[in-house]
Image: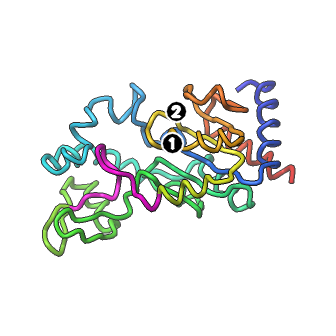
């Protein structure tokens, strides 16, 4: 990020945030790659580089070939357990603490926003903090299961009935959690600024969430390495490391209060 472009874009973004009445952030995998968690699409480190998603991470394949899902997800669980919130996660938490961010809608399952201190958080693709038995539907906390699974690869089973425990993450072919999505859409009501951080806006339906606010006149800042289909509607676009841009942006915002 060159100094001249950086200054101009940062100053414009600061004005947008400080003048907004309600700002909402939408985050994707790119905000967590600086924490060591691979995204799903990059050829070098993407989680789909060696696997067909429909063969390992669909609801249908989970029911009939759960071993394939657990073999695929185990390295990701190890990454998540060892990851720490990076400056981008922390910057959004600070913006919320300052009363300048109404909440975060995230596609990520890694829990890093919550661990960074974000409070109003909508995890539309679920999370790993809980799992549900596919036989008796008992829901359990996973803190006693994840580390053992990451270390041994042993598939977790329900202590009540012996059924398979499915992490509370959304698989292909599975509906998003209705209540969470409803609350996320409610959060977007009347927002006049959307910050897209680390998302290429390729996954539905999350990629459509900004459209209604934009049509109602909301402004938008995009911080993402790759182009998005909404670039032409953005007020500011940073093609830079989100873990560099967000801390600088939030620092400037809080310094100008």
Task: Say if the magenta span includes residue 229.
Answer: no
Which residue is painted at 35% across and 64% down in the image?
A: 130
- Disc 2 vs disc 1: Cβ atoms closer than 8 Å? yes
Residue farthest to the right, as pictured: 256
| Quadrant location of the C terminus in the rendered image | bottom right
Q: Quadrant of the N terminus?
A: top right
The label number, if any, that marks residue 200 in the structure image: 2
Q: Quadrant of residue 128?
A: bottom left
Give the Cα distance between marks 2 and 1: 8 Å
> SS class of the residue under badge 2?
loop
Question: Who's the residue at 26% across and 33% down the image?
Answer: 51
Image location of residue 141, percent across then percent down: 34, 69
- Badge 1 crowding class, 10 Å Cα cut-off, few under 14, some 14 to 19, many 20 or more, is many
User: Foreground residue, 79 or 234?
Assistant: 234
Residue 170 % position (x, y)? 34, 51
Magenta-span inclusion, residue 173: yes
Residue drawn at x 15%, y 65% as measured from the top left: 163
Q: Position of residue 72 (x, y in %)?
A: 26, 42
Q: Is disc 2 surrounded by few (<14), some (14 to 19) or many (20+) residues within 10 Å?
A: many
Left or right, 172 with respect to 22, comes to: left
Chain-order first, disc 2 or disc 1 = 1
Count up the numbered dots: 2
For the rendered model, the colour scheme is rainbow
Q: Nearer the viewer, residue 46 or 191?
A: 191
Query: Relative to 154, does residue 219 appear above or below in the rendering?
Result: above
Residue situated furthest front in the rendering: 216
Direction from residue 242 to residue 205 in the image, left or right: left
State the residue position of label 1. 28
Residue segment shown in magenta = 165-180
Quadrant of the rendered image containing residue 38: top left
Per the rendering, the mark at residue 221 is none
């Amino acid at each position: 990020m060159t100094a001249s472009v950086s200054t101009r874009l940062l100053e414009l973004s600061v004005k947008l945030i400080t003048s907004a009445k309600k700002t909402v952030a939408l985050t994707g995998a790119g905000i967590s790659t600086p924490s060591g968690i691979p995204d799903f699409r990059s050829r070098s480190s993407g989680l789909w580089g060696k696997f067909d998603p429909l063969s390992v991470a669909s609801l249908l394949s989970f029911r009939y070939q759960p071993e394939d899902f657990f073999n695929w997800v185990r390295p990701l669980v190890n990454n998540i357990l060892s990851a720490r919130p990076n400056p981008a996660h922390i910057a959004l938490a600070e913006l919320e603490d300052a009363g300048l961010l109404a909440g975060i809608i995230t596609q990520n399952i890694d829990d890093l926003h919550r661990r960074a201190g974000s409070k109003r958080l909508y995890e539309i693709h679920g999370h790993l903090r809980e799992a549900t038995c596919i036989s008796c539907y008992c829901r359990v906390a996973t803190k006693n299961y994840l580390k053992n699974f990451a270390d041994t690869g042993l598939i977790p089973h329900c202590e009540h009935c012996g059924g398979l425990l499915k992490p509370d993450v959304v698989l292909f072919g599975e509906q998003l959690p209705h209540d969470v999505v409803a609350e996320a859409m409610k959060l977007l009501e009347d927002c006049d600024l959307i910050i897209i951080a680390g998302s290429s806006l390729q996954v539905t339906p999350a990629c459509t969430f900004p459209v209604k606010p934009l049509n109602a006149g909301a402004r938008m800042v995009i911080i993402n390495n790759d182009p998005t289909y909404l670039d032409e509607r953005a007020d500011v676009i940073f093609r830079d490391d989100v873990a560099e841009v967000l801390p600088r942006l939030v620092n400037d915002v809080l310094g100008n209060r």
